[in-house]
Amino acid sequence: MKKLLHLFENIWDRSGAYLIATLILTIPLYPKFPFLEVPGIYVSIRLEDFVILVVCLIWFLAHIQVFPKLIKSNFWRAFILFWAITLLSTVSGIVLTHTVVPVVGLLNWGRRVEYMIIFLLCLDLKVTKKELKFFLLTICIVILYAFVYGLGQKYFNWPIITTQNGEYSKGIALSYMPGGHIVSTFAGHYDLASYLILVTPIIVVFASHSNVFEKTKKRMNFVLFTIMSSLAGVWLLANAASRISIISYFGAISLALILVKRKYLIPLVALIVFIVAISSTSLIGRYMSIFDVLIKKASAAELVVSTPEPTQPPPLEDRSTNIRLEVEWPRAVRALKKNPLLGTGYSSITLATDDEYLRSLGEVGIVGTGAFALCFFLVFIELGKQFIKQKEFNTQKLMLAAAIGMIPGVFLNMVFIDILEASKFAIMFWLILGITIAHARTTE
């Protein structure tokens, strides 16, 4: 038995980086085809879940002898506390409030564990400069592949696989319609846009400090490759046509550049984003719909003042905003009122809330949301502590700056999108945070 466990230790030590790189490639690029359907839920078990399971099993068998010691760390304790509270919340939804179907609720809870455990696995990696560059180039390959596939969807009728409603989630291949959203290999335009907020600050930061990796003629090749990836990401972001994500994206990159003392590049980034954004008719159309509503409402208000008995005009609304204000957000608030401490359980407020904070409060209550906030707090404190600890702009400090820069952008997106429910984004979010801290803790 000891020989077998030692074998897995060697596999993880020698191949852990390749296993994580497999996730970096597989999760964003493999379409969400269903493998096993679960009755009563639109989210299916997919092949990517088995890839994650294999990686987790290898990690566990490699660490089974030291596992009792590992779980005493603050990160493990906080994550286990969150999982325990949210499991209690889901059981409460099944037994007390009767708002959760057992299989559906427990599967949703299990998915949260699946997404977050990747962070804990990555913490155990030895991420040297070599491994970090490998991960960075892998992310660039993902963006370029997604860019090519996005072009194919828009101009060559390549298939779109999305999970934005129950019927589409069965694996039905759709086609791009003029004025629509590009989703590329992702399940929806929102998780594609959020993924770009997550990874592009990393690419831009290292492109601006390319000397940390290359000091020879290879440096120009690295810069060109990262710039190509960044521009491809901007095109994808503009054609995903997520209004809030453009703002989050620019804010995340700007903060990261300020942290690495490259703020003079911010106007250039703004210019590139603006030029690409105005070329996207779907994005411009979505912004204009807000302005049209505001202008028409202002005109209607003037009409009311000047006309004694005005004819009531039809309501003027931006569709996505109206759905949030009239349907989704009130539904989450009602769930919170029903059980303020534990919420009504995972899956209890249906497909979407379009606000990660309200969704969390509605599903797992104040206690569950507080436990989740503790996990984030520990992560952010560790990032800040490690950033201050680094005295020069080495790879550790640059990676930390990129992570610190992207977090506010992600948090802003969470106001309007249930982004941590989207597997392609959530897994990569926790994975990159884990790699960042692991690299900061690794001595060359």
Image (cartoon, rainbow, N blue to C red):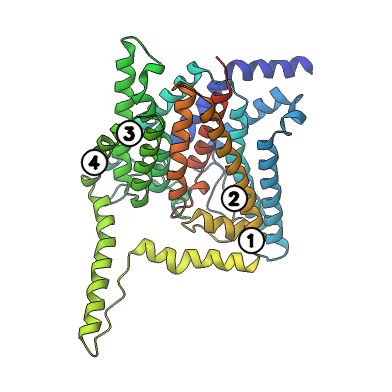
* Mark 2: amino acid: Val
Label 3: which residue?
263
* Mark 3: amino acid: Lys
Name the residue nearer the viewer: 414 or 52.
414
Label 1: which residue?
343
Query: In the displayed structure, would residue 308 be above or below residue 51?
Result: below
Query: In the rendered structure, are the residues bearing label 2 and label 4 in contact, judged by CB atoms less than 8 Å apart?
Result: no
Residue extending furthest toward the bottom: 309
> What percent of the width, then of the height, locates residue 264?
29, 32
**Alpha carbons under labels 1 and 4: distance apart:** 42 Å
Task: Tell me which residue sits at (50%, 38%) in the image.
Answer: 429
> What percent of the width, then of the height, locates residue 33?
48, 42
SS of the residue under disc 1 = loop
* Comes first in the chain, label 2 or label 4: 2
Q: How many labels does the image show?
A: 4
- Tell me if residue 281 can be seen: yes
* Mark 4: amino acid: Val
Single out the mark in the foreground, 3 or 2: 3
Q: Locate residue 18 relative to residue 297 in the image: left or right.
A: right
Residues packed near mark 4 inside 10 Å, few (<14), some (14 to 19) or many (20 plus):
some
Residues packed near mark 2 inside 10 Å, few (<14), some (14 to 19) or many (20 plus):
some
* Comes first in the chain, label 1 or label 2: 2
Label 2: which residue?
38
Residues packed near mark 3 inside 10 Å, few (<14), some (14 to 19) or many (20 plus):
some
